[in-house]
């Protein structure tokens, strides 16, 4: 009886022990799994842009608020994907962005500098419309295309078959201000509230886009307006939390009412003067530099002329002129290889910031990326196609060639639809790739100087986990990868940090 | 006079020499540049998928023809981007693909195996329609959704409020064959010729997509049809130049006219029998394996049931059952982490082929990628979001975890619009990433078993320079990264190589 009890007890405890060991093993294996998983996730986070930043206590407060808002938008998006802003075309969600709290925080955030923006495509449409109230402004409408043209003149400029000049003031009075301004706006930006035509391709939208540069050309190249437009942009930029600018420009010939014309040097001098004035007037402004970026559609003789011009400008403006680039639709203009023999002859002190890979043509247009890195480009304009080029990827990491990502531009100009497919999302996942966010031609899609693109980077390109640290890093990157000298960068960082501290203090309060 | 002449001569030759040295230096620098450029381009090509292949003389002939066609299509695309097929939604260009010579070559090409396709979404719509001519087939139409349901039965199945059964033969006679079949087709695939609604998001299209599985369910789960459908697919596959299959399936309960039902084991046995029969009948057929892939929408008790089931199936079908996966929209179903504790308890001999990262939700749904690699997944289903995950990228390279890229599926199910933005293009640029091309649910977009996806990989994902070598490598990859044993792979390669040789001989002739 007793021995039976012992046997029974032993059997029961053996079963128990076996069961416990099995459970213990299972739990331990799962715990190991969870630990490894946490480590993998942490490794990815450690590699992402922003991970080098350690937030202060106050920054943590701001971050919590920001991330609560981001998480709520993501959760709503998961419930209703078509309502998620970065899934949509920018025009369909512009008003929603403008009224979102995340956007308001980003607007107030000091974002550093803008390293990729084009001369006549930067000011708000409101401001451009206001310029048409200036006296002595004439207009004509191309009877075939319906495109407006402007010209400042004391008297009516000579009319041609395609151009019958009338005074803007009279035209506006005739049509009524509201009607006039509304059709004017429609020619100053691509933005409109019509349903997006998803069947338009990159060439079709580029044609319309290029047309905009024609409409505002005569208006902006009037020398006094040229300077005012630029200074107004610096003001808009500063209000948008941006303290530094590297402007790409074609330096078109300017004119005034007295028949004087202004060549490239004179044009650049106006930029320089305006920059100095603005710096005097605005102590928080870091400064600006200029990248001479003529149009890539040019013949062989034209290439030589451009090289002579950039050399001359470089000699005359050795610090204000940051370097050289070529603009226009890469798919249509001449590739970098056509310029490379001449570019190699330029003085070593001229830096390059080449547009390259702003295309979906894999192995065709995007070969510009290869030439850009080979020619020693300091940064890549767009670099949209970069992940299709393994050698270029190696080079940008090794040589710290920053990629100027312009999310909204790439969407509006039809490279990508859902912003989450933008290759910038891959760049932001890996801090080895030097990346800056920029805005390209914000005037033409009625975006702010930088906040809308920062919004898209934060909500559409970044991981759900990327937070204030990423935004802060992007601001720092814009100084780090700028054309400023090391000393200038130190001063710039100081000016930016002051603003950053103010921003954090205000928001944490 | 003489001395003047000498001075003049010396001066002239000095100028000449200086000029010559300068020209010589310029030329030399440019030659260096071109050499380095050629090297960079070659380095990229050497790294791309296909570069390990050396073509035979006959293959070169086929390649030249193929590349001439590809180049012509690319050139036409550059001229008119909206006419470029991979830019368009698949439905808008299906007929153009079907009549293109590139597609005809790809159809004839032996493409190896299909490693990612789902049980009831594989046969041509014509074939599925033909099944509805079988006797004893009943249908009802859901009065709310309008969705059809089918059921084989000797007598009318019991009607319910939402289901009034009528004989398909009577219904077809009543409506007229053309009208009946046309509305039937519209419920069997997403394909239609209506203009694409670009405002539909991933959830909306997934709802419709999931609905299709419901429409054909009662039709296909009739045991005799179940087997016939599978065998017909093997036939369609072989005709499409595909010799091997790894089919994912949910193993639903089957039924017959005598009231017998068939459980998972019996279902899988039907697959196995059919595979053996087909292999007997078709000596060029390599074989097939099965991946048990139940739906991921399941409760905790359901998870345990699934684990018991896969273990049981694995014991009974140790070689035919290649492994385990979970299906359904990742954004909506349970994430892998919910299954992981149970998965860790499965026998080590069960392999995994997890769907992961079929999403645009960065840092949310796509965390499944982390769990997939941690759980030891042999391949990744889709892996669309992989480039947002640096640790996963490292793992797939190190562990040779193949990514099953399904380009058309991802476009139709609204992850991407322009095919050139598909991350598969990055995978194809770098042979370190193991990649296979597959078709997912070709029945539901009226695609061939594999040729349409190969076409998209070749024209939309690959570089303009990637050629027959890439296609050949993709065929080889489908065997290399299959679940076959090393010995099976040797046999498979032999059978594939015979077909490849035949293909090359015929086309080179």
Image: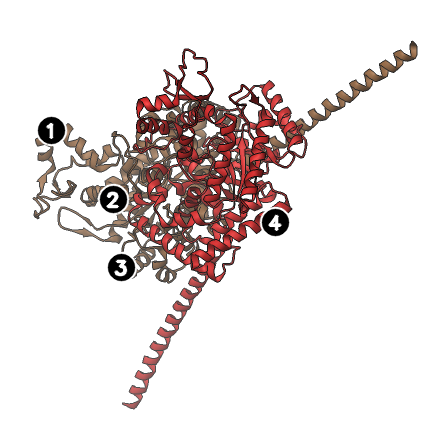
Chain colours: A brown, B red
Q: Quadrant of the N terminus of chain A?
A: top right
Q: CA distance from mark 1 to mark 4?
A: 81 Å
Q: Chain of mark 3?
A: A
The residue at which mark 3 appears reads as A299
Q: Secondary structure at mark 3?
A: loop
Looking at the rendered structure, the secondary structure element under dot 1 is loop
Q: Chain of mark 2?
A: A
Give me the disc on residue B218.
none
The tag earlier along the polypeptide, 1 or 2, is: 1
Label 1 or label 3, whichever comes before in sequence order: 1
Q: Give the vertical position of B138 relative to A323 (above or below).
A: above
Q: Residues within 10 Å of mark 1 (few under 14, many from 20)?
A: few
Among all residues in the image, which is located at the extreme bottom?
B2
Q: Which residue is mark 2?
A: A207
Left or right: where does residue A360 sit relative to residue A273?
Answer: right
**Image mark 1: chain:** A
Picture quarter containing residue B371?
top right
């Amino acid at each position: 009886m007793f021995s039976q009890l012992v046997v029974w007890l032993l059997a029961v405890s053996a079963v128990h022990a076996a069961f416990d060991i099995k459970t213990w093993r299972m739990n331990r294996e799962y715990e190991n799994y969870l630990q490894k998983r946490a480590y993998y996730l942490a490794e990815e986070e450690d590699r992402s842009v922003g991970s080098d930043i350690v937030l202060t206590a106050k920054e943590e407060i701001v971050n919590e608020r920001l991330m609560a808002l981001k998480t709520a938008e993501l959760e709503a998006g998961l419930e209703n994907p078509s309502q998620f802003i970065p899934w949509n075309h920018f025009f369909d969600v512009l008003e929603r962005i403008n009224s979102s709290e995340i956007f308001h925080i980003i607007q107030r955030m000091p974002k550093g500098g803008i390293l990729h923006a084009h001369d006549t495509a930067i000011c708000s449409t409101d401001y451009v419309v206001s310029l048409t109230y200036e006296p002595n402004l004439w207009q004509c409408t191309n009877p075939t295309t319906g495109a407006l043209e402007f010209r400042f003149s004391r008297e009516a400029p000579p009319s041609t078959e395609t151009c019958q000049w009338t005074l803007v003031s009279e035209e506006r009075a005739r049509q009524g201000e509201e009607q006039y301004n509304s059709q004017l706006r429609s020619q100053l930006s691509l933005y409109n509230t019509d349903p997006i035509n998803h069947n338009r391709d990159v060439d079709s939208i580029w044609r319309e886009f290029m047309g905009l540069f024609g409409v505002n050309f005569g208006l902006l190249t009037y020398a006094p307006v040229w300077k005012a437009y630029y200074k107004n942009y610096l003001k808009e930029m500063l209000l948008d939390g941006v303290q530094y600018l590297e402007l790409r420009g074609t330096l078109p010939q300017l004119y005034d009412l007295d028949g004087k014309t202004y060549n490239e040097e004179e044009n650049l001098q106006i930029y320089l003067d305006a920059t100095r004035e603005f710096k005097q007037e605005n102590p928080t402004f870091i400064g600006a530099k200029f990248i001479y970026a003529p149009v890539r559609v040019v013949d062989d003789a034209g290439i030589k002329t451009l090289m002579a011009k950039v050399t001359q400008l470089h000699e005359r403006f050795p610090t204000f002129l940051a370097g050289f680039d070529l603009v226009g639709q890469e798919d249509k203009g001449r590739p970098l290889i056509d310029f490379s023999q001449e570019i190699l002859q330029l003085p070593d002190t001229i830096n390059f910031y080449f547009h390259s890979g702003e295309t979906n043509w894999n192995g065709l247009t995007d070969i510009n990326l290869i030439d850009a890195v080979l020619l020693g480009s300091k940064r890549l304009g767009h670099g949209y196609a970069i992940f299709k080029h393994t050698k270029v990827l190696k080079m940008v990491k090794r040589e710290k060639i920053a990629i100027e990502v312009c999310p909204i531009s790439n969407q509006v100009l039809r490279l990508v639809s859902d912003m989450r497919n933008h290759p910038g999302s891959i760049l932001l996942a890996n801090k080895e790739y030097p990346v800056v966010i920029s805005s390209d031609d914000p005037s033409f899609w009625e975006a702010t100087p930088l906040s809308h693109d920062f919004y898209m980077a934060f909500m559409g390109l970044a991981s759900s986990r990327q937070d204030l640290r990423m935004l802060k890093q992007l601001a720092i990157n814009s100084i780090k990868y700028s054309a400023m000298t090391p000393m200038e960068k130190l001063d710039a960082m100081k000016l930016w940090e002051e603003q950053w501290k103010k921003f954090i203090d205000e928001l944490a309060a």
